[in-house]
Image (tube, rainbow, N blue to C red):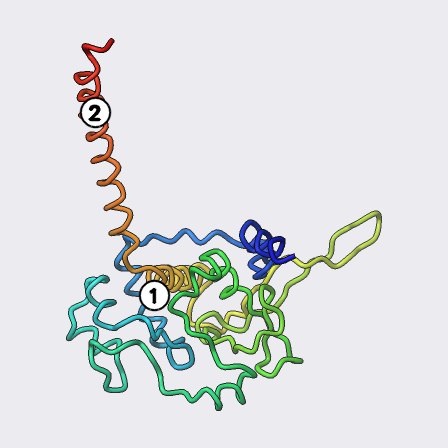
């Protein structure tokens, strides 16, 4: 039985950890080489997310260095409560209070993009909708009954489920066609989508800050192995020349 459970966990992790979603996920076309997008994502994170969600494995200084932000500029515009540049990106919210307010302590987001995936995050942040039955007045298509408020609502406006009447088998029936903001936000639809994409881009970066360095090193290693193979092959022919 234990071997069976192990094999299921190994080959079908999505079944075990529930990584799938009943809602089709939109593709997050993120770009870790786009420093401007990463900087905008960092700004959105510290302004709208860091008050509840920590990044206890990510340092401000590493973020500033990787994103091309001078330490003094980062300290002025991305640090608001007297942290040092070498501090981790944490907040002071007590877990007990958070559990009371939200039903559970907000999770650390350092590795959330590696756990959930960029497409899930991109779709989730754009899938809040008005639901007066919920404590914060909103629900989410991707994560039903989530305890998180729609922290980006002032930017997007109040999102509502929209429906249209369609003729089906001779009868007019109401069909869900998506979520649409009421226009009260400070951003239009495309601007809000770009802001969310920038935030997802930043979360992907924090999930593995060395990913670009790792990929570049991997290419160099492959080139080295290919060149080495040529010399090893020629050496092998030289050694076995008399034998053949």
Q: Quadrant of the C terminus?
A: top left
Tell me the residue at 41%/51% (across/down).
29
The label shown at residue 164 is none
Residue nearer the viewer, 195 or 125: 125
Nearer the N terminus, badge 2 or badge 1?
A: 1
For residue 6, which quarter of the picture?
A: bottom right
The label shown at residue 230 is 2
For residue 45, which quarter of the picture?
A: bottom left
Q: Quadrant of the N terminus?
A: bottom right
Q: Check the image and name the residue furthest to the front.
A: 243
Disc 2 to disc 1, C-alpha distance: 45 Å
For residue 102, which quarter of the picture?
A: bottom right
Q: Position of residue 199 (x, y in %)?
A: 38, 64
Tell me the residue at 19%/12% (across/down).
241
Count residues near mark 1 (Cα–Cα under 10 Å), then give few for <14, some for 14-19, many for 20+.
many
Residue nearer the viewer, 238 or 58: 238
Q: Position of residue 90 (x, y in %)?
A: 33, 80
**Left or right relative to 67: residue 121:** right
Q: Position of residue 243 (x, y in %)?
A: 22, 11
Tell me the residue at 35%/73% (across/down).
55
Give the tally of numbered discs.
2
Residue at disc 1, secondary structure: helix
Q: Is residue 86 above or below residue 165?
A: below
The label shown at residue 41 is 1
Tell me the residue at 47%/60% (across/down).
122
Count residues near mark 2 (Cα–Cα under 10 Å), then give few for <14, some for 14-19, many for 20+.
few
């Amino acid at each position: 039985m234990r071997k069976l459970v192990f094999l299921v966990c190994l080959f079908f992790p999505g079944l075990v950890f529930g990584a799938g979603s009943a809602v089709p996920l939109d593709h997050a076309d993120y770009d870790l080489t786009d420093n401007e997008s990463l900087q905008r994502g960092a700004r959105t994170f510290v302004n709208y997310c860091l008050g509840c969600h920590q990044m206890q494995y990510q340092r401000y200084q590493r973020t500033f260095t990787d994103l091309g932000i001078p330490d003094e500029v980062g300290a002025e515009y991305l640090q608001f409560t007297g942290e040092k540049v070498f501090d981790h990106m944490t907040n002071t919210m007590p877990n007990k209070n958070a559990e009371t307010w939200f039903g559970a302590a907000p999770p650390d987001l350092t590795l959330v993009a590696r756990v959930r995936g960029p497409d899930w995050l991109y779709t989730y942040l754009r899938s809040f909708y008005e639901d007066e039955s919920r404590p914060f007045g909103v629900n989410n298509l991707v994560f039903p009954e989530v305890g998180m408020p729609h922290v980006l609502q002032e930017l997007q406006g109040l999102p509502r489920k929209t429906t249209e009447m369609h003729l089906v088998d001779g009868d007019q029936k109401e069909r869900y066609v998506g979520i649409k903001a009421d226009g009260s936000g400070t951003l239009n639809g495309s601007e809000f989508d770009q802001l969310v994409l920038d935030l997802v881009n930043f979360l992907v970066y924090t999930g593995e800050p060395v990913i670009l360095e790792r990929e570049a090193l991997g290419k160099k290693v492959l080139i080295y192995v290919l060149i080495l193979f040529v010399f090893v092959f020629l050496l092998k022919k030289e050694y076995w020349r008399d034998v053949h």
